[in-house]
Amino acid sequence: MATTTKQTTSNLKDTNSKSPWTDKTSDTLHETVDKVATKASTAEENIRNAASKSADTVSVKKDELQKQLNSSVGRARKAAAENPLATAGIAFAAGLVVSALLSRRS
């Protein structure tokens, strides 16, 4: 892009040699735009790379948490199946606590 811009600017200089200030300003502006475009491209690439790494990290953490949740649910089901009377007692006690808390609010 920079080469094309410089070539175009050079062609303008040849045809518009009566306005050197305009030519110089045009050259400077083209160079500035090229520099900004390069920096913007680099910044965009850095942001995309960071976003990609973040997405990968979130995906890995999600998978780990899903495995932990499945493991915990499996252990709770196993404990409930091995001790049905204790499970019923805990559920009853939890229901009493919840109903007591809700009745106090009213």
Image (cartoon, helix red, strand yellow):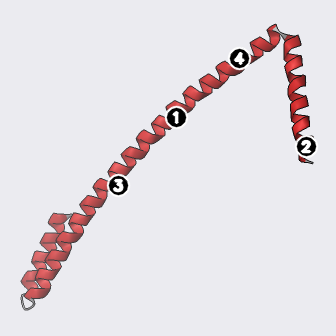
Q: Which residue is outermost to the bottom?
A: 18
Q: Earlier in the sequence, mark 4 or mark 1?
A: 1
Determine if residue 16 is in view: no
Q: Position of residue 101 (x, y in %)?
A: 87, 39
Q: Of residues 72 and 12, which is closer to you in this image? A: 72
Q: Using the image, determine if residue 101 lies above or below residue 106.
A: above
User: Where does label 4 land, which residue?
Assistant: 74
Give me the C-alpha separation between circle 3 and circle 2. Answer: 57 Å
Q: Residue at x 61, y 27 (%)?
A: 66
Q: Select label 4 or label 1 by which is in front.
A: 4
Give me the C-alpha separation between circle 4 and circle 1. Answer: 22 Å
Q: Using the image, determine if residue 78 lies above or below residue 51.
A: above
Dot 1 amino acid type: Ser
Left or right: where does residue 63 sit relative to residue 46? right
**At numbered mark 1, what does the secondary structure look like: helix, strand or loop?**
helix
User: Where does label 1 land, which residue?
Assistant: 59
User: Where does label 3 land, which residue?
Assistant: 44
**At numbered mark 4, what does the secondary structure look like: helix, strand or loop?**
helix
Dot 4 amino acid type: Gly
Give me the C-alpha separation between circle 2 and circle 1. Answer: 43 Å
Q: Select label 4 or label 2 by which is in front.
A: 2
Q: Residue at x 75, y 12 (%)?
A: 78
Q: Which residue is outermost to the front?
A: 104
Q: Which mark is residue 104?
A: 2
Q: Earlier in the sequence, mark 3 or mark 4?
A: 3
Q: Position of residue 73 (x, y in %)?
A: 71, 21
Dot 2 amino acid type: Arg
Circles 4 and 2: CB distance less than 8 Å?
A: no
**Label 3: few (<14), some or many (≥20) within 10 Å?**
few
Q: Earlier in the sequence, mark 4 or mark 2?
A: 4
